[in-house]
Image: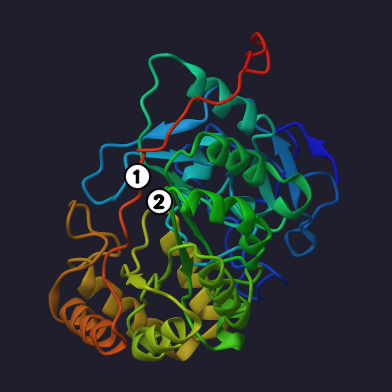
Amino acid sequence: MSLHSPHEGSPRGVPNVKGIRGRGAAGNPDQRFAELHVDYDPGEAPEKVATKFLRDHSSTIISRNSSPDLPFEASLNPYRGCEHGCAYCYARPTHEYLGFSAGVDFESRIMVKENAPALLRAELLKPSYKPENLSLSGITDPYQPIEKKLRITRGCLEVLAECRHPVVMITKNHLITRDVDLLAELARHSATAVYISITTLDAELARKLEPRASSPKMRLEAIRMLHEAGVPVGVSTAPIIPGLNDSEIPALIEAARAAGAQFAGYTVVRLPFAVKEVFRAWLDQHFPGMRDKILSRIEETQGKTLSHGEFGKRLKGVGVWSEQIAALFKVSIKRAGMLHRRPEVSAGAFRRPRDPGGQMELF
């Protein structure tokens, strides 16, 4: 594996409903910023797309948001783009700011922040820095396949564990269990909680919907291992796609609870910007007979659109279908004896990290 310059090309064009093996998107829809785009590599066709990892030269690592919809204000994202390839991913349009498409580009042109651990350490060393709850990550999965080799997320967790800095993790990859030692250390100081995202228990549906993520069975195993290590762990049954996986809510909650999950959360699907085209093409490929029904129900939950524009309504939805999903989720977690909210994480044990360029401390 080698890292490349971000000018290297990527396949473009209208969605190809025949699909691409191992990809969630069926092609590259045009992006919003038409003057910014990356063309094909010579001889590269959409059905032969190989993943490329591009250096991200960001000079800061902690991102902040003011959205009232999100349970965090600060996040840390080691990667931009995500090889898991989830067809519904709301983060796909963020790739358009880089000149890429929200389609296959998003899952095959991965921006890698190699210096993320060093940037994080530098940020936490600042005398002005005050610890705040971090989400790792806020956009794309911190444990996508390349993390096994690059270990950037682990490097960031090493810094956070050294500092006892509060962090909430969310992933759909069993690879998080590699870092159970660091998470258990953070848990001893009430400084972490983990969500494992499970969208379906149907392994075949999961392979189509989230082609390069861990299987549902392995995600349940990750819950079990984290629970046994003393790490507060819950399940994110998200997104709920009405007409596709909403009927699975009780079974998902029951299976997660049996594996050791203590809390649960959910969101309903929304399809902003080019995600509409990606998901519509995915339905054409895998569930053509159900496409109109599913899209119609999504529109009902999103206020007669595919992505509601108002805070407070986008993530849980509006209307009858959203009310039914909320009621079913509430009954399911009550029956399982699970909490709807995760435990609070604490910065009470925070300490500054070691300064590799500073003077040695004397004891």
Q: Position of residue 122 (x, y in %)?
A: 56, 20
Residue on which disc 1 sits: 346
Left or right placement of residue 165 versus residue 85 in this view: left
| 216 shown above or below 31 | below
Could you say whether the residue bearing mark 2 is in a helix, strand or loop? loop
Give the CA distance from mark 2 to mark 1: 6 Å
Is the C-beta separation of discs 2 and 1 under 8 Å? Answer: yes
User: Mark 1 is on which residue type?
Assistant: Ser
Residue at left offset 32%, top offset 70%:
266
Q: Nearer the viewer, residue 216 or 29?
A: 216
- Residue 114's tag is none
Label annotation for residue 190: 2
Q: Residue furthest top?
A: 359
Total marks shown come to 2
Amino acid under disc 2: Ser
Q: Position of residue 53 (x, y in %)?
A: 74, 43
Q: Earlier in the sequence, mark 2 or mark 1?
A: 2
Question: Which image quarter holds the C terminus?
Answer: top right
Secondary structure at numbered mark 1: loop
Front-lying residue, 278 or 64? 64
Residue 57 x %, y %: 64, 25
Q: Residue at x 70, y 51 (%)?
A: 147
The structure residue drawn at horizontal position 58% and vertical position 59%, both measured from the top left corner, is 14
Depth check, front residue: 345 or 57: 345
Image coordinates of residue 110 in percent, x first then y, are: 66, 46
Residue 201 visible in the displayed image: yes
